[in-house]
Amino acid sequence: MSASLPPILVVDDEKNMRLSLQTMLGDENHAVRAVESAEAALKLLTTEEFFMVITDARMGGMNGYELLGKVHAQWPDLPVLMITAYATPKLAVEAIKAGAIDYLAKPFAPEELLHAVSRCAERYRLLKDNASLRARAGEVYHLEQIVGESTKMRELRQLIQTVAPTDARVLVLGESGTGKELVAGALHTMSQRRKAHYVRINCAAIPETLLESELFGHEKGAFTGALRQKPGRVEEADGGTFFLDEIADMSRPLQAKLLRFLEDGTFTRVGGTQELRVNVRLIAATNRDIVKAIAEDQFREDLFHRLNVVQLRLAPLRERGEDIVLLAEHFIKMFSGSMNRKVTTLSRAARQKLLSHHWPGNVRELRNVIERALILETQHEVQPASLPDFQLETRLHKDTAPRATGKESLDEIVATFERELISQTLEQHHFSLTRCAEFLKLSRHALRYRMQRLNINTATDADDDTPPVPAVREVKDQ
Ligand SMILES: Nc1ncnc2c1ncn2[C@@H]1O[C@H](COP(=O)(O)OP(=O)(O)OP(=O)(O)O)[C@@H](O)[C@H]1O
Ligand SMILES: [Mg+2]
């Protein structure tokens, strides 16, 4: 019966009692470890797993009630059964209130004991099953939330799956709106720390003067307004995950303190002298160009190396190809559910319009565009007229000539420029390849070849030479 159960811990300072408990439980195939003091029990509990504790109430040294209190505080899921020779209803109530699962008065019948033990065994199994169910559900759910089937997104999900269960620090980089927060959340829920707290601090949203006390806490009177002691958010995250968002916005002096914290997990509250220590896994993110921030002396290079144990880079949406459509459909489903709308998908022309946009605001922008479209749309399919006039926005973002940044090769810069130019021209010509090719003074074949090379969706009017009628009509309707 107890093959899958860890042992029971028996605590009693009377040798005979220990022996008789060991026999009773052993006869039912329970593994037992017996110790003669509460102190020894606490020590053993830190190194071995038990599914329950059976303790005598009165013992020399720490008594059973104190042991119960400590066990309950540290291992709240571990059931404790109290045994005493001096049973009174009042003591029984006290024991149960203090967290004992049950209370047996000496002398007791073996069945009474075994009954209590089997209830604990059942409870242990339930808790285990539940935890593994939750873990599995969490994994699937949270990776599925990250929509996208492009190679980049598949690789990202794979990497998250590999890195999440480790304690490695992760630096998440990517333009604004690419999904960095989503990734940080998934890393936590798929980690061993999922049951502990996930604390997120946005360094850009908190005034510089308050950020340190927010992170590390302060002592009473540390500064004007510090009326009482306040623990830091890192303490809240103890045992869990600490997500520092917009890390590049942190001031240099605070970066030095963070560096120390990352070196050995220690910190001091503002105005305090005591060195405190916590165990947190750190995830950091920024949408700024961190290399540039280091070059300009705004960000400490040593801190960057400490944070950059694993780097996850989120590609801009415009480089994720068909994912734009998948995400749009995902948001359509999401919003039509919450807004109670009957819109189910994108029309062909709307799809083309989305595919040719530059998406400077990435997934967040797409999400907002779809939300707005669902408010405006009267048909079952999203029509281009319900989407914003991207041409205006496109022009806003593209009037500047490309410039070398030192990070990309000439070929990459030219490819980006060419991709944008062709996408823009396609949009201007309502996605007619023929007209776009004429406009660019290319053969239709040459244009298709370039689009394929540049990863631009070629399913416009690729199969027939006449532009798709609905597309033209709908776009004109705007
Ligand atoms: N791959 C994705 N699948 C589904 N939803 C996504 C995906 N990526 C981002 N989102 C959604 O897009 C929105 C913006 O994402 P998020 O807040 O994670 O961006 P961010 O990278 O943290 O941006 P910022 O740098 O501006 O803080 C959120 O609503 C998020 O749920
Ligand atoms: Mg964010």
Image (tube, helix red, strand yellow):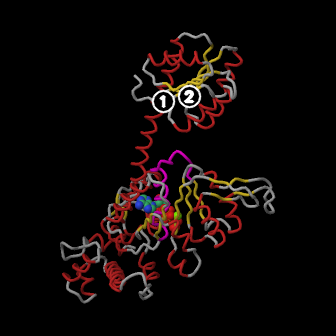
Whether residue 375 appears in this view of the structure is no
Which residue: 64% across, 72% down?
251
- Mark 2 vs 1: CB contact within 8 A: yes
Q: Residues within 10 Å of mark 2 (few under 14, many from 20)?
A: many
What residue do we see at 39% from left, 27% from top?
Answer: 3
The image position of residue 81, as x and y in percent, is 58, 23
Q: Is residue 45 left or right of residue 164?
A: right
Is the CB–ligand 1 distance for label 1 below 8 Å?
Answer: no
Q: Quadrant of the N terminus?
A: top left
Q: Tell me which residue sits at (62%, 64%) in the image.
A: 260
- Depth order, front residue of 54/438: 54
Helix, strand or loop for disc 2? loop
Q: Locate residue 242 relative to residue 449 in the image: left or right.
A: right
Residue 150 to residue 15: above or below:
below
Q: Which residues are magenta?
A: 175-198
Query: Measured from the top left, where is residue 453 in percent x and y?
Result: 25, 77
Q: Which residue is mark 1?
A: 124
Camera-side residue of 316 and 445 = 316
**Label disc, if present, on residue 79 of the rendered structure:** 2
Which mark is on residue 326?
none
- In whole angstroms, how far apart are the C-alphas of marks 2 and 1? 9 Å
Q: For this rendering, which residue is in front, 97 or 457?
A: 97
Badge 1 crowding class, 10 Å Cα cut-off, few under 14, some 14 to 19, many 20 or more, is: many
Which residue type carries mark 2?
A: Pro
